[in-house]
Image: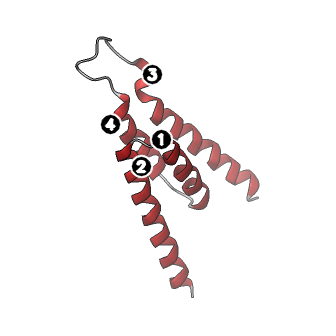
Amino acid sequence: MLRNKITKSGVLRIFFGVALFLSVINGWWPMILLIGIIGAWYWPHFFEFIVAGIAYDALFGMISRTSTTTGTGIWGWIGTIISILLYTVILLAKKIVRR
């Protein structure tokens, strides 16, 4: 019985990881936030959410070479910052709620 539960949870986590990856590749940031928040609440260490923020910034947050501006500053890392902040808030909320 326990093995069946672990297997279902593992398959669901893989499904969430693939959905998160596809959302990052397609640039669907609202879907990334939704999947990340649900995953961070459901599993104890859902670091895929933070990795998704880093990957999103690497793909879409940096400035292109053809742009006329010289840099994006903190806005180039906003996906990473938001994912880390949300992960931390969810982690603290889980500790409070699950006491």
Helix, strand or loop at label 4? It is helix
Residue at position x 53%, y 53% in the image: 35
Rounded to the nearest angstrom, the CA distance separating label 2 from label 4 is 12 Å
Q: Position of residue 56 (x, y in %)?
A: 39, 39
Count neighbours of disc 1 (C-alpha within 10 A) and say few if under 14, some if 14 to 19, many if 20 or more.
some
- Image quadrant in which the C terminus is located: bottom right
Sequence-earlier tag: 1 or 2: 2
Whether pointer 3 and pointer 4 mark residues with C-beta atoms closer than 8 Å, the reply is no
The quadrant holding residue 38 is bottom right
Helix, strand or loop at label 3? It is helix
Check disc 1 and give the amino acid type: Trp
Return the residue at label 3.
74
Return the residue at label 4.
59
Rounded to the nearest angstrom, the CA distance separating label 3 from label 4 is 15 Å
Sequence-earlier tag: 2 or 4: 2
Colour scheme employed for the rendering of this structure? secondary structure
Return the residue at label 2.
23
Helix, strand or loop at label 1? It is helix
- Image quadrant in which the N terminus is located: bottom right
Q: Nearer the viewer, residue 93 or 24?
A: 24
Residue at position x 53%, y 50% in the image: 36
Q: Position of residue 86 (x, y in %)?
A: 58, 41
Rounded to the nearest angstrom, the CA distance separating label 1 from label 3 is 18 Å
Whether pointer 1 and pointer 3 mark residues with C-beta atoms closer than 8 Å, the reply is no
Helix, strand or loop at label 2? It is helix
Residue at position x 53%, y 45% in the image: 33
Check disc 2 and give the amino acid type: Ser
Whether pointer 1 and pointer 2 mark residues with C-beta atoms closer than 8 Å, the reply is yes
Whether pointer 2 and pointer 3 mark residues with C-beta atoms closer than 8 Å, the reply is no
Residue at position x 51%, y 84% in the image: 3
